[in-house]
Image: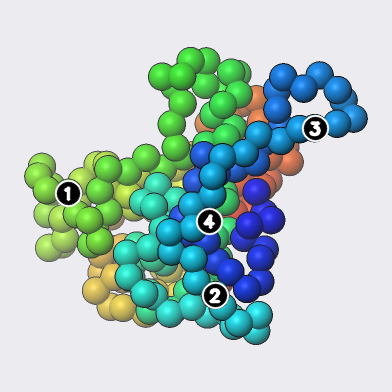
């Protein structure tokens, strides 16, 4: 999972679970793993300088379910942390492929399956106004906060836009859900990986 995001001269958008390289379950040999792969998505590939730390926001980037909070909040500059977030989302989705975590295919879903994403692609109906901002239960940030909890002021001190800060303050307080409760069959290493990649503050 980390190899595509560690490429220095290219950044791929968006990483998705269907492009992941995974061991072939039909291979019984313990010493040889034949990977299964699917075509990579290079729709918005862009070259970057190896020394470039920040990337200018160029528009509506990254598929909604894997979109980092700083992109949702329209931060003008962002770093490779957006890819770290995406990898964490993909990893969580892969954990749902384990039967003990999701017994049937109906139980499997992305980690953050939002159906809208204010202000990039807001919900068209059934929104509730809070402090002047539209809110919907399936909006991407709302879905994210249902898992990681509502961020504190310290968590969003990286946000530069005052309107975005006001928007964050309009969310109801939600408690963080332990990833171990979401993925009971996950190893401690897997839970640690999620805790290190699914972090609201990119700094």
Which residue is under mark 2? 47
Query: Is disc 3 placed on a helix, strand or loop?
Result: loop
- Nearer the observer, disc 3 or disc 1? 3
Q: Quadrant of residue 67?
A: bottom left
Residue at 48% from the left image edge and 78% from the top image edge: 55
Mark 4 and 2 residues: CB-CB less than 8 Å, in contact? no
- Lower position in the chain sequence, tag 1 or tag 2: 2
Q: CA distance from mark 4 to mark 1?
A: 23 Å
In the image, residue 127 above or below residue 151: above
Q: Residue at x 52, y 80 (%)?
A: 54
- Mark 1 to mark 2: distance in Å? 33 Å
Secondary structure of the residue carrying tag 2 is strand
Q: Nearer the viewer, residue 43 or 107?
A: 43
Whichever of labels 3 and 1 marks the residue nearer the N terminus, that label is: 3
- Is tag 4's residue or tag 1's residue first in the polypeptide sequence? 4
Q: Residue 95, image x and y in percent?
A: 59, 32
- Disc 3 to disc 2, how far (Cα)? 31 Å
Q: Is residue 64 left or right of residue 130?
A: right
Q: Which disc, if any, is residue 33?
A: 3
Numbered label attached to residue 85: 4
> Which is more N-terminal, label 2 or label 3?
3
Marks 4 and 2, Cα distance to the nearest angstrom? Answer: 20 Å
- Reading the image, the residue beneath label 1 is 123
Figure quadrant of the C terminus? bottom right
- Of the two numbered discs 4 and 3 in the rendering, the one whose residue sits closer to the viewer: 3
Tell me how far mark 3 sits from mark 1, CA to CA. Answer: 44 Å
For the residue carrying disc 2, how many other residues have a C-alpha within 10 Å: few (<14), some (14-19), or many (20+)?
few
């Amino acid at each position: 999972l980390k190899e595509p995001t560690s490429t220095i001269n290219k950044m791929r958008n968006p990483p998705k679970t269907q492009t992941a390289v995974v061991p072939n379950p039909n291979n019984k040999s313990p010493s040889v793993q034949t990977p299964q792969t699917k075509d990579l998505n290079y729709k918005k590939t862009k070259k970057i300088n190896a020394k470039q730390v920040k990337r200018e926001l160029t528009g509506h980037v990254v598929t909604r379910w894997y979109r980092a909070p700083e992109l949702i909040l329209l931060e003008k500059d962002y770093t490779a942390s957006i890819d770290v977030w995406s990898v964490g989302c993909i990893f969580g989705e892969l954990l749902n492929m384990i039967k003990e975590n999701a017994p049937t295919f109906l139980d499997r879903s992305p980690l953050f399956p939002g159906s809208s994403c204010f202000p990039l692609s807001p919900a068209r109906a059934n929104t509730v106004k809070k402090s002047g901002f539209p809110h919907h239960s399936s909006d991407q940030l709302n879905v994210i906060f249902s898992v990681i909890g509502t961020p504190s002021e310290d968590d969003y001190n990286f946000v530069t836009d005052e309107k975005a800060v006001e928007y964050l303050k309009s969310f109801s307080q939600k408690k963080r859900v332990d990833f171990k409760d979401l993925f009971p069959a996950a190893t401690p290493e897997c839970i640690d990986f999620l805790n290190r990649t699914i972090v609201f503050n990119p700094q």
